[in-house]
Image: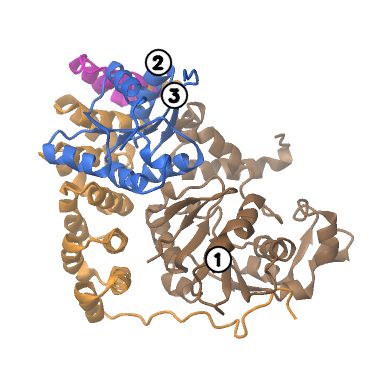
Chain colours: A blue, B brown, C orange
Amino acid sequence: MADDTPKRVLVIDDATLVRRYYRSALERAGFEVAEALNGVEALEHLLAARFDLLVVDVNMPQMDGLSFLQTLRAKSLPLSSTPALVTSTESAPQRIAAASAAGANFYVVKPLHAEALVQYASLLCGIRHG
Amino acid sequence: MIFTEAKRYYVERRAVDRMLGTRSDSFEHYFGRLRADVQGEIEQFVNAFTVNETYFYREEHQLVCLTSDLLAARLTVKPRGEPIRIWSVPCSTGEEPYSIAIWLLENWPHVDEYDIEIVGSDIDTDAVALARVGVYGKRALMRLPARLVDKYFEADDGASWRILDDLRQSVRFTAVNLVDRANTRLHGKFDVIFCRNVLIYFDDLARRTAAENLFENLSPGGFICLGHTESMSRVSPLFDVARFADAIVYQRPMR
Amino acid sequence: MPLIRKPPSAAAPQTAAPALDARAVLEALARGNDDERWAAARAAADFPAAVPALGDALAHEKSPTVRQALFSALARIATPQSVETILPFLRSDDALIRTEASDALLAMRDVAWPFVPVLLRDPDASVRTQACVLVRDMPSPVAVSLCCDLLDSEPDPNVCAAAVEALAEIGEASALPALMRCADRFRATPFLEFSIRIAIDRVRSQVLNPRA
């Protein structure tokens, strides 16, 4: 079934400038964007509305991105299967493994390029977790 | 909103509150944040002009949530015979705890089947004293239907109404400092805490301490409601986020 | 007779646990169950001598709730020793522990500030980034100076981005030259270029509204 409604992305990062950069790139590409500054705020958004994709930073105050993902994946469907792109400053294999174990679908090392973000977002909005 | 010269002090106080809340050390710095809408400052600024108003049935959706979902959830895990305990803190001059009492009487079919303890607490002992007296003006009652004013109040003079004694006796008032653990612990464990529009005024350390105190004052699985513009995302990771039809609330995890 | 039926002994809420002395705190931190370790961690805030024991407890504590109370105790004790006890946890492999440690330092504010210049030169880029978050709340002349120095020599664009974020929020005109030099250095990093452009705009709008 063709779906013309814009895909909704929740950008989860404590840095205002990062959220702004992602928002501008994603909105230009036709996505609808909401923002959260940490995992707690992200959960509040997700319990109130459906999203097609999460872009999740790892290091955030109160609740980090991996703890957030673990909490999310423990909830019931369909919420728990929302695709998640984890962004991180770390490239070490054990950090990537930790993200995967927490429930990441995709992992990208920061800083992210606007075009790459849009490509990954478009790709991931067609994939369901699990 | 329109403000006359007479309201200058009111406006200045709200602007200063937002400057403190954003740690702006000059008005120019704050104004820059406001114009650029940094972290939703426009909304925060607007809310600052309504947040400290207290009146009966304020944030009614949380009262709906209380009787639609929160009490039922608590009753599935509470031992039989254990009273239901609800805390309104800060209670200011009593509008919130009395509202809870009236709301329960009007909207909860099981209100007569359980022992219910409603406690209202505030750091301002003058406000607590006024809460015990229970006399209110027209503005505080503006959201209450006339039928409820007639039912639960008696006219005190032309411009004020006194809560009926039977209702006044349904609420216990205390003084409390949320940051003082020895003080908060005396209040025991609650099923539901309403803690609206006070944590935003604390600095990081005080907010953290208050959140831990409130955590201790909740039974496992108990709920805490913040003001509708507030979020635990800026306060503490101790609580789970819980969504119900009428409100997002926070929950102390069950063991 | 109240309209709401109250419990018979309405004046008697559940009793609070007895206050713990220093020895009981240390004992419970090491050997207590979840509730006992939580209570001991909270009580430890009154005993500066408990700092080493709090550090030991943090090294093994698996419960995030108890860890929150342990970090809070260190934040409330607020001595240089408590800062030093927290710092190693900024390097944890566990993202949540890094967050908890960072939040605790933010709550300690002025006690943590003397450590910031050293943290800004830490070999670990993640620690340098967290130091930039601490810088944001420091008095603005010092904060601006530290961020600008960092922007002139920092090789990692993510750390630069954190310093740019701090400068954008502080909004001081004296940051402009360093911001522009950093933009030159990182022409190949569009995100950083974008961030610096926004920061420059923000700073310039402060300049147009000079302080009295």
Q: Residue furthest left?
A: C123
Q: Determine which quarter of the picture holds residue B173.
A: bottom right
Q: Is residue C147 above or below residue C104?
A: above
Give whichever of A70, C89 is nearer the camera. A70
Left or right of C138 on screen, residue C131:
left
Residue identified by numbered label 2: A29
Residue B50's x, y, as percent? 64, 44
Q: Which residues are magenta?
A: C173-202
Label 1 lies in what chain? B
The residue depicted at 30 percent of the width and 25 percent of the height is C174
CA gap between label 2 and label 3 equals 10 Å
Query: Mark 1 belongs to which amino acid?
Result: Ile
If the image is split into quadrants, where does the C terminus of chain A sit?
A: top left
Left or right of B35 on screen, residue B130:
right
Give whichever of B223, B90 is nearer the camera. B223
Residue B29: in sight, yes or no? no
Residue C82's x, y, as percent? 21, 60
Q: Residue furthest right?
A: B158
In the structure shown, which secondary structural element does the residue marked by tag 2 occupy? loop
Dots 2 and 3: beta carbons under 8 Å? no
